[in-house]
Every structure is written in structure tokens, then in C-alpha cells.
Image (cartoon, rainbow, N blue to C red):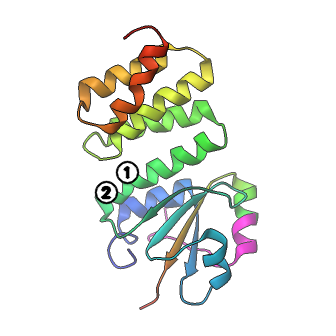
């Protein structure tokens, strides 16, 4: 990560604009390994501003793929701290900006969840499931969304 | 925009900046060398 991914201009810009970047030495900072239960490197943890873990990514990724994980981490933090409107926008941007990413179906799923949580409108769940069926019919995230349709009386 | 990521390494600095900016943390565990 340090040799290729972190020096990439787009990665530098995204991290600098949206995160507080904290680097922890796996070999010496054992209290941090215990605190976050980290057993492998590279591990990247996305945490809220109190340090509470909300999402993690393990293993090397090249810059063009890691960027989508940065967007996912940011959106997951917003969703887990109940900032549903912001999270819905971030998941929507991820799905729109990185449609070829393996994370795009997950982003559509949580876009629906967050918009639903923000507005209590069921239509957002229907829209998310419909988008998954149209764009990612083989995705597990479509299967996860199917019970929504049944609950809404649409299946 | 910085040319490289300006990593923090001290927990107190990290939490102070996070509180001031309300931005989430990105915590990178790395093995030197």
C-alpha cells in the first residue's frame, strides 16, 4: 500500500479531503493491535471521530480499486453513526462513480436502507431492489433485498 | 492539496483533529520495510 496505493494522486486527494489519516506500526504498537483486534497487514480501519470502528478492509488493493473502498468506508461510517441522509448520498455517489466495482451492489442496497431510514418512505427500498435486479441480477445483495418486496406486498 | 498523505501517528493528535473537524478516521496498520 505504501509503495503504490498511498502515493497515488487520487488516493492522496480523497484521504486528505475526507479523513483524518492515522498510521499505526504493526510491529511495535501492540496496544493498538489488541484494541482493534488486527492480526494481519495491511489492514485499514474506518472509524468514527471517537475512534469506534465502523468498517475495515484487509489486504493490498491497487489505487483504482482502493478508491471505491475509501468511498465505502466513508459511507459506512456515516450510516453507522445514523447520519442517514449523508450516508444515502455517499452510497449513491459510490454506486454512480464506480459502477464496475464489486462494491456497487452493496452501495445500492445501503442507499435504499439509508434513504428509507431518513424518510421512512418504503419506495426507497423498492427502488433499491429494482436497481439491483436491473443492474446486478447475479448479486447476493439482490437476494438480500428480496424480503423487502414481500414485506411491501410487491412480490 | 498535499502531494502526499500527511499521516498522524499520535493518538492524542488524531482524536483532537477528529473532534475539531468531525471527519472520520482512516487507521492504516502497516508493517515497516
* In magenta segment, residue A140: no
Quadrant location, the N terminus of chain A: bottom left
Instruction: Locate residue B27, reporting x and y percent.
Output: 56, 68
Q: Residue A68 carries which label?
A: 1
On screen, residue A151 versus residue B12, left or right, reads left
* Residue corresponding to mark 2: A65
- Split into 4 quadrants, where in the image is the C terminus of chain A? top left
Q: Position of residue A140 (x, y in %)?
A: 33, 38
- Element on which disc 2 rests: helix
Task: Using the image, name the chain to which the residue with label 1 belongs.
Answer: A
Judge if badges 2 and 1 mark residues of a common chain: yes
Q: Which residue is drawn at 54% across and 89% down?
A: A27
- How far apart marks 2 and 1 lie (CA) works out to 6 Å
Residue stretch in magenta? B1-15
Asked if the residue under mark 1 is in contact with the one under mark 2, i.e. CB atoms within 8 Å, the reply is yes
- Marks counted in the figure total 2
Q: Residues within 10 Å of mark 2 (few under 14, many from 20)?
A: some
Report whether A101 appears left or right of B3: left
Main secondary structure of the magenta stretch: loop
Residue at 61%, 32% (x, y): give it.
A84
Q: Using the rendered view, name the quadrant where residue B18 is placed.
A: bottom right
Q: Position of residue A124 (x, y in %)?
A: 48, 19
Residue at point 34%, 40% (across, down): A104
Amino acid at each position: 500500500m505504501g509503495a503504490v496505493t498511498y502515493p497515488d494522486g487520487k488516493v492522496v486527494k480523497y484521504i486528505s479531503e475526507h479523513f483524518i489519516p492515522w498510521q499505526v506500526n504493526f510491529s511495535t504498537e501492540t496496544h493498538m493491535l489488541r484494541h482493534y483486534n488486527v492480526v494481519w497487514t495491511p489492514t485499514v480501519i474506518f472509524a468514527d471521530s471517537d475512534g469506534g470502528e465502523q468498517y475495515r478492509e484487509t489486504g493490498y488493493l491497487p489505487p483504482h480499486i482502493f478508491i471505491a473502498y475509501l468511498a465505502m468506508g466513508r459511507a459506512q461510517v456515516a450510516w453507522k453513526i445514523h447520519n442517514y441522509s449523508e450516508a444515502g448520498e455517499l452510497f449513491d455517489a459510490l454506486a454512480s462513480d464506480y459502477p464496475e466495482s464489486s462494491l456497487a451492489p452493496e452501495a445500492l442496497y445501503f442507499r435504499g436502507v439509508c434513504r428509507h431510514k431518513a424518510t421512512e418512505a418504503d419506495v426507497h427500498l423498492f427502488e433499491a431492489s429494482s436497481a439491483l435486479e436491473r443492474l446486478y441480477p447475479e448479486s447476493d445483495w439482490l437476494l438480500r433485498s428480496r424480503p423487502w418486496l414481500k414485506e411491501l406486498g410487491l412480490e | 492539496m498535499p502531494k502526499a498523505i500527511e499521516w498522524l501517528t499520535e493518538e492524542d493528535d488524531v482524536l483532537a483533529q477528529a473532534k475539531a473537524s468531525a471527519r472520520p478516521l482512516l487507521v492504516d496498520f502497516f508493517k515497516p520495510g
